Image (cartoon, rainbow, N blue to C red):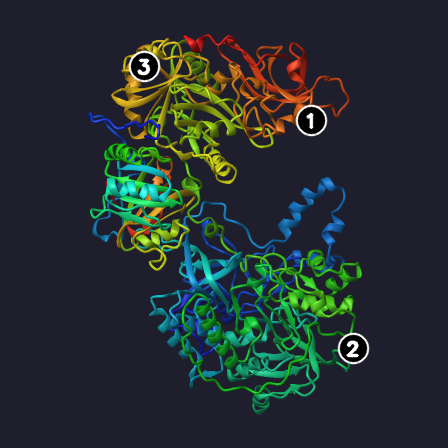
């Protein structure tokens, strides 16, 4: 078969396609050909493919309706390879490339012979809006089962099951003027703003910039419209201050003129980005634009008329017919009937006739149409039937005839006998709906204009709508409005208004349009054949009428009940018709009914573009200490603490077998208790505090006293929020009279620094004190255990004698030849030295410690062992023992509260509230399971009476629970109501599996209760 | 003296040091792209970094005397000495970042403290906690646009400007010491994340890493 035979609907000449090159593609497994410049839709039409999908709910055959973003039916699954599957692609927006493979998203076993269609046909009448809610309501537990089958039956494509080979990224953009849409209005605006010197970005969603000018009948400055487009684009491309982004959709308009632009960089070249120089370029890119001013030149979508059978293949928008003929050189049929309410629709008939095909009739709803294009049609000898409309399309797999009759719009009825006109294509035009989606994203309510029978964007600061988006359709006015918007926007960003004369165009005479949305039928909507409003969601006029009868009056409720304007369609074709029908049924005006809110995204955006580079290894920052490589090489398992990667435990190979976590932690724990262990504690937050009022500041921010902490000493501090609840803790050291070093929890470091600044800047600015984070500057190595002094003594000049360097003191000196501050503080209860050196030296010091440490059994341990050891000592972890509802008193830490400090401290007042003074608060206690082999579950609920009827009163929960190798038993910390007065009592922990554990309330200190080990 | 303690964290012996990116070079490599490279990365490692906090007037007099350059009083300003080796950057109304050649930070802190006497101020040595990453090449600005939300267009980001901003999901200081050079000052713990991010984003420009 020759190519011309295959593309039977392709014109011999005309259009913006390259006939010298042929591209092959498949659709639903069939092979077809098209040309560069085609969209998938235009190529399918050229090949005479009528049915492109089955409808969502009724499974009716559907064909291509539109030529752009508003296409509701031709939504395809793209991709040959599994990894390249893309759902939700509009065939009208997908450029054809060689080897493209697409298939319909609905239809089983295929779109031509569809079994689900039988269900739709048989059940169609019985599937009103709310069908699923009403039918599958009971029993509620079955919904998940129903849903599985409903989802299978109806869907809009599937996601790939393999990893995406492509990469995506973001680009943060800033400009003075962002122009969205590069048609007549957008290009004029861009030109004006660019000549004024503003930084301009122009985004256009189509393959080529130019919008409707690319297929226009009109001339600008005496040349064809597309030549004017080429000239303007050339000038813009030459401007350093202009960025042109074709194939770029403004998908979301967010607050403060933040607009996201989705640029498809390689989707027109192949299903994955073609490799260039051995590398795959970015497939699509999200431009995150902060714009000074935004010009909405998004144009308008033609509104179809709502008549019976308007969903069969062969029913198209009038403007789409023109676009396919003029831009793609495809006539989507042989015999046309045009049903219109306005002059613009006539262009389809004129283009059809010029393409050499038969125009059966133009059916005009107006009694006496008059205007240049009406005259042109008459001059061409085209039959015009006035005061009438196509009330029904016949045919199911393709239009076979149009049923035409006179209509009375006011009375909403057919007022003459019906005549049947044989045809294969019905084009309809009900006027235009400005594309107001982006303005709606900002929350601006659109305004109805009776003169244009459409909604225009509501006012938004810094936004200029022009051209079709603003309800202005005459080309001359569109160009002038674009120029004006460009000048205004440039001026608003401080760029002098330039003089730009819009090109001259011939002014057309046009007669007024008539307001026609739903076309009356001989039968009432509820009993007549289906009249579709929203083709993508299978919403009919009858469905909307039924919704109003069932009591839905708000358009937002009608939308949700019928699904009108849902999903990826966002009501592009159907919403205004739907509102008009609701208005008629409710006997209100359209502005009274109002619109629903259009939401981002304007058209679907691939997840890759949203994620950009923030995926896989780069999903979130991983913060490393200076010793990270050592931990990796030692085989550590890591734990996420905030964004830090901290060694969790270091499993060893024993007899060829890798230790379990339990084995490793037991070994590490005993090493610390019996010999010496080492922990990388660099992640602890460290804040350098300087100033004469530093001490006073500490006294106000911490609960305990600081006035007597001498230079060289360290003290544990507890910090509350102003509600009296514990928020952080850590050791603060006095480095000099006016100089302190505060440590915070690893996760709290940044928030605590902000907390300090907040109180200093807003409440106590009179205190002379400054804070700086030094967390990353210092690497901290904790050596702990009975042998730690001997080990450190080998490599430091600091006097480590127990009387000259006491517990809770710090000293400066050298460790392994490196200047170091060493702190004698302990989180394990053992003799401990925390060695701090500048992080760049950390690796050397750490390795030296191991060189010397081997003979002492130096063992690296991770956070899990740290947790066990500190819990054995009853040391809390903020965020584990506390959850924002725990006071120092609940923790039994009254010793850490300076009730009589002279100046009130944060949390003091809250601790005198009746609730914080209440007897029965949950208090921190130890739990000893009656069965020592039991390790209670963290989070397990505690009850006093396990025989109590369900629901049992909850008495508290387990906050920390471990197996203690040194005690050889399980043990736990828990918060229990009134627990501090219940020492020795038994509590119960009923588990999900029916077991009930028993435990005794004991002191939180399980090991070395007198604290002798850390003081040796 | 303000009664704060100073501490020289450096040692003059031949003790090995590791810059924040040492791990990253071993783990992720340092691509060499040669002449086809459109963007170059270089760590300016082991420099002296000090945070100055205090009143602008008091600090300005001191740094003029000691360092010979003035304290930038204007927000987002970066001042350098003639060699470009020493710089002061405005960070917030009472906070500046001083970067000097490695080893100069301790004598500088000592001199500043002597000069500042009993005024209220703070100087914190953060040399181990951050590193400077220099980005050059024709694609430098576009590379930054991928990661940095701040507007890096020359009209908004002239030479001599420096800001604290977001780099991917980390906080960073971004500065422009000269026409061709951009500099990121990143926290040590975030350095590897930033480096891997830069390598990934710059791959399309044939990134060249100078070690």
Single out the mark in the foreground, 3 or 1: 1
In the picture, which quadrant includes the N terminus of chain A?
bottom left
Q: Do the residues under discs 2 and 3 have CB atoms within 8 angstroms?
A: no
From the viewer's perspective, is residue A585 above or below residue A919? below
Nearer the N terminus, badge 2 or badge 3? 2
Say what secondary structure mark 2 lies in. loop
Chain letter of mark 2 equals A
Residue ID for mark 3: A792
- Report whether residue A38 is seen: no
- Badge 3 crowding class, 10 Å Cα cut-off, few under 14, some 14 to 19, many 20 or more, is many
Residue A893 figure quarter: top right
Parent chain of label 1 = A
Which chain is disc 3 placed on?
A: A
Q: Is residue A241 above or below residue A720?
A: below
| Mark number displayed over residue A5 | none
Which residue extends farthest bottom? A379
Where is residue A578 drawn, in percent x and y? 68, 66
Of labels 1 and 2, the one closer to you: 1
Q: Which residue is mark 1?
A: A914
Residue A650 percent across, percent down from the top left: 40, 21
The mark lying in front, picked from 2 and 3, is: 3
């Amino acid at each position: 078969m020759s190519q011309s035979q295959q593309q039977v609907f392709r014109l011999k000449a005309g259009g913006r396609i390259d006939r010298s090159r042929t591209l092959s593609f498949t659709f639903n497994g069939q092979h077809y050909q098209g040309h560069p410049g085609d969209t998938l839709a235009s190529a399918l039409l050229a090949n005479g493919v009528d049915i492109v999908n089955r409808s969502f709910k009724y499974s009716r055959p559907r064909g291509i309706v539109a030529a752009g973003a508003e296409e509701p039916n031709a939504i395809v699954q793209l991709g040959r390879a599994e990894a390249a599957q893309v759902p939700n692609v509009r065939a009208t927006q997908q450029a054809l490339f060689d080897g493209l493979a697409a298939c319909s998203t609905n239809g089983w076993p295929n779109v031509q012979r569809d079994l689900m269609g039988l269900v739709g046909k048989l059940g169609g009448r019985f599937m009103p809006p709310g069908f699923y809610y009403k039918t599958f309501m009971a029993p509620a537990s079955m919904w998940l089962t129903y849903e599985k089958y409903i989802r299978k039956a109806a869907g809009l494509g599937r996601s790939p099951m393999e990893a995406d080979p492509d990469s995506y990224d973001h680009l943060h953009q800033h400009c003075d003027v962002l122009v969205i849409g590069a048609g007549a209005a957008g290009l004029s605006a861009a030109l004006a703003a660019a000549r004024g010197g503003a930084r301009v970005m122009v985004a256009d969603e189509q393959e080529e910039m130019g919008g409707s000018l690319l297929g226009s009948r009109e001339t600008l400055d005496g040349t064809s419209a597309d030549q004017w487009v080429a000239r303007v684009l050339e000038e813009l491309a030459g401007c350093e201050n202009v960025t042109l982004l074709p194939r770029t959709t403004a998908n979301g308009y967010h607050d403060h003129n933040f607009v996201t632009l989705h640029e498809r960089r390689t989707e027109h070249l192949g299903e994955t980005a073609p490799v260039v120089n051995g590398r795959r370029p970015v497939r699509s890119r999200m431009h995150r634009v902060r714009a000074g001013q935004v010009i909405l030149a998004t144009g308008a979508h033609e509104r179809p008329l709502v008549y019976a059978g308007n969903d069969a293949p062969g029913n198209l928008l009038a403007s789409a017919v023109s676009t396919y003929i003029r831009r793609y050189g495809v006539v989507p049929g042989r015999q046309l009937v045009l049903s219109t309410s306005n002059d613009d629709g006539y262009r389809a008939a004129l283009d059809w006739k010029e393409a050499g095909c038969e125009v059966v009739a133009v059916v005009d709803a107006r009694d006496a149409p008059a205007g240049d294009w009406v005259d042109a049609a008459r001059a061409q000898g085209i039959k015009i039937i006035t005061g009438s409309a196509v009330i029904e399309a016949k045919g199911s797999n393709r239009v076979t005839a149009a049923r035409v009759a006179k209509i009375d719009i006011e009375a909403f009825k057919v007022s003459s006998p019906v005549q049947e006109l044989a045809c294969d294509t019905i084009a309809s035009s009900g006027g235009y709906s400005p594309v107001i989606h982006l303005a709606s994203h900002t929350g601006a309510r659109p305004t109805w204009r009776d003169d244009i029978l459409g909604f225009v964007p509501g006012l938004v600061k810094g936004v200029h709508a022009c051209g079709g988006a603003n309800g202005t359709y005459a080309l001359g006015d569109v160009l002038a409005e674009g120029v004006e918007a460009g000048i205004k926007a440039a001026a608003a960003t401080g760029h002098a208004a330039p003089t730009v004369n819009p090109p001259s165009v011939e002014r057309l005479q046009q007669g007024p349009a008539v307001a026609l949305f739903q076309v009356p039928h001989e039968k009432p909507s509820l009993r007549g054949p289906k009249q579709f409003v929203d083709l993508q969601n299978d919403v009919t006029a009858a469905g909307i009428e039924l919704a109003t009868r069932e009591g839905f009056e708000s358009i937002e409720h009608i939308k949700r009940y019928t699904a009108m304007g849902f999903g990826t369609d966002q009501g592009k074709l159907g919403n205004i018709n739907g509102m008009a029908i609701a208005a008629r049924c409710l006997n209100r005006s359209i502005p009274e009914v109002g619109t629903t809110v259009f939401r981002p995204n304007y058209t679907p955006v691939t997840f890759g573009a949203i994620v950009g580079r923030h995926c896989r290894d780069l999903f979130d920052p991983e913060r490393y200490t200076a010793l990270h490589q050592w931990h990796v090489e030692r085989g550590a398992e890591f734990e996420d603490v905030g964004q830090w990667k901290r060694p969790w435990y270091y499993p060893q190979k024993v007899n060829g077998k890798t230790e379990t976590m339990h084995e490793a932690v037991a070994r590490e724990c005993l090493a610390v208790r019996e010999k010496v262990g080492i922990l990388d504690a660099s992640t602890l937050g460290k804040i350098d505090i300087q100033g004469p009022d530093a001490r006073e500041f500490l006294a106000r921010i911490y609960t305990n006293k600081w006035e007597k902490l001498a230079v060289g000493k360290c003290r544990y501090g507890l910090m509350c929020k102003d509600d009296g609840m514990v928020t952080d803790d850590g050791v603060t050291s006095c480095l000099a009279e006016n100089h302190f070093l505060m440590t915070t929890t690893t996760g709290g470091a940044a928030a605590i620094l902000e907390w300090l600044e907040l109180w200093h800047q807003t409440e106590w600015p009179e205190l002379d004190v400054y804070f700086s984070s030094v967390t990353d500057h210092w690497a901290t190595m904790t050596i702990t255990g009975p042998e730690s002094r001997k080990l450190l003594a080998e490599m430091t000049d600091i006097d480590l004698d127990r009387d000259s360097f006491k517990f809770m003191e710090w000293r400066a000196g050298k460790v392994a030849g490196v200047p170091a501050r060493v702190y004698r503080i302990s989180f394990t209860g053992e003799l401990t030295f925390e060695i701090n050196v500048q992080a760049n030296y950390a690796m050397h010091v750490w390795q030296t410690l191991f060189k010397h440490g081997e003979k002492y059994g130096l063992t690296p341990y991770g956070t899990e062992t740290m947790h066990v050891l500190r819990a054995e000592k009853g040391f809390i972890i903020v965020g584990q023992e506390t959850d924002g509802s725990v006071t120092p008193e609940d923790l039994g830490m009254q010793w850490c509260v300076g009730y009589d400090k002279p100046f009130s401290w944060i949390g003091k007042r809250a601790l005198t509230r009746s609730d914080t003074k209440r007897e029965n608060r949950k208090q921190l206690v130890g739990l000893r399971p009656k069965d020592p082999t039991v390790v209670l579950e963290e989070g397990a609920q505690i009850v006093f009476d396990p025989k109590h009827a369900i629901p049992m009163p909850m008495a508290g929960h387990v906050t920390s629970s471990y197996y203690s190798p040194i005690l050889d038993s399980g043990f736990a910390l828990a918060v229990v109501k009134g627990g501090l007065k219940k020492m020795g009592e038994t509590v119960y922990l009923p588990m999900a599996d029916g077991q009930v554990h028993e435990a005794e309330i004991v002191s939180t200190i399980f090991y070395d209760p007198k604290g002798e080990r850390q003081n040796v | 003296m303000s009664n704060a303690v100073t501490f020289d964290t450096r040692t003059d012996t031949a003790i090995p040091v590791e810059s924040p990116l040492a791990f990253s070079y071993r783990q992720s490599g340092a691509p060499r792209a040669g002449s086809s490279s459109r963007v170059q990365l270089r760590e300016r490692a082991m420099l002296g970094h000090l945070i100055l906090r205090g009143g602008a007037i008091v600090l300005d007099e001191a740094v003029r005397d000691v360092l010979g350059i003035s304290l930038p009083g204007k927000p987002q300003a970066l001042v350098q000495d003639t060699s470009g080796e020493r710089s002061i950057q405005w960070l917030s109304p009472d906070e500046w970042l001083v970067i000097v050649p490695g080893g100069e930070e301790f004598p500088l802190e000592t001199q500043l403290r002597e000069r500042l006497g009993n005024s209220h101020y703070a100087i914190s040595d953060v040399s181990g906690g951050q590193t400077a990453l220099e980005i050059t090449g024709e694609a430098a600005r576009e590379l930054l646009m991928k990661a940095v939300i701040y507007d890096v267009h020359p009209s908004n980001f002239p030479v001599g400007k420096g800001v604290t901003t977001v780099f991917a999901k980390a906080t960073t200081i971004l500065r422009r010491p000269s026409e061709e050079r951009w500099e990121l000052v990143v926290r040590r713990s975030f350095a590897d994340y930033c480096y891997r991010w830069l390598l990934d984003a710059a791959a399309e420009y044939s990134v060249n890493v100078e070690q």
